[in-house]
């Protein structure tokens, strides 16, 4: 059993369970825990543990993480706005994912075509 591949998954599950339990006592602590940079180090650990990982591949992966965080911020922003506007959970998630997808597509297009 390769613990370098299994342990990050176990830690991710533990974090999700922790957030589910803590939210009953403090929604603020649960929200902070949910948005802490916990999954990024776990993802880096998984990528670093791969047999064929070079510094170039890990650098490319890290750049992908950076690009991916921007649409996630857009997702959270849209979710906050739509929840505060009284939308249903389905509308909130649908709109937030649409904003996430559009932002990601734009960033990937900019990167692919070297627009900036």
Image (cartoon, grey):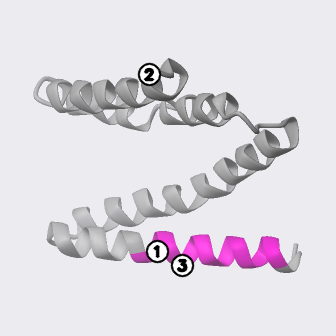
Residue 74: image location, x then y, percent: 50, 63
Image coordinates for residue 115, horizontal then vertical, percent: 87, 78
Q: What is the crowding at mark 1: few (fewer than 14 residues within 10 Å), some, or many (at least 20)?
A: many
| Front: mark 2 or 1 | 2
Closest to the observer: 85 or 95? Answer: 95
Mark 2 and mark 1: Cα distance apart in space = 32 Å
Is any part of residue 86 visible from this angle? no
Q: Quadrant of residue 40?
A: top right
- CB within 8 Å, label 3 to label 1: yes
- Please give left or right for residue 62 compared with residue 8 in the image: right
Q: Nearer the viewer, residue 30 or 16?
A: 16
Q: Specify whether 82 is left or right of 11.
A: left
Q: CA distance from mark 3 to mark 2?
A: 33 Å
Secondary structure under tag 1 reads helix
Task: Say above or below: 65 vs 75.
Answer: above
Q: Residues within 10 Å of mark 2 (few under 14, many from 20)?
A: some
Q: Which mark is residue 99?
A: 1
Residue labelled with disc 2: 7
Is 18 magenta? The answer is no
Residue 8 coordinates in the image, percent (x, y): 46, 27
Number of other residues with Cα within 10 Å of mark 3, as a class: few under 14, some 14 to 19, many 20 or more: some
Q: Earlier in the sequence, mark 3 or mark 2?
A: 2
Query: Does residue 71 show up?
Result: yes
Magenta segment, prevailing SS (helix, strand or loop): helix
Q: Which residue is mark 3?
A: 102
Identify the residue at image location x=43%, y=38%.
35
Give whichever of discs 2 and 1 has the lower sequence position.
2
Q: Which residues are magenta?
A: 98-112
For residue 39, side relative to residue 83 (left or right): right
The residue under the point 23% across, 70% down is 85
Q: Quadrant of residue 96?
A: bottom left
Quadrant into which the N terminus falls:
top left
């Amino acid at each position: 059993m390769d613990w370098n591949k299994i342990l990050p998954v176990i830690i991710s599950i533990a974090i999700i369970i922790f957030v589910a339990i803590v939210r009953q006592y403090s929604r603020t602590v649960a929200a902070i825990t949910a948005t802490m940079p916990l999954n990024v180090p776990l993802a880096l650990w998984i990528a670093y543990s791969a047999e064929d990982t070079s510094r170039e591949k890990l650098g490319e992966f890290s750049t992908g993480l950076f690009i991916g965080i921007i649409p996630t911020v857009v997702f959270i922003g849209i979710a906050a706005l739509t929840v505060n506007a009284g939308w249903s959970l389905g509308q909130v998630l649908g709109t937030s994912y649409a904003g996430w997808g559009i932002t990601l597509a734009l960033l990937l297009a900019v990167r692919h075509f070297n627009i900036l």
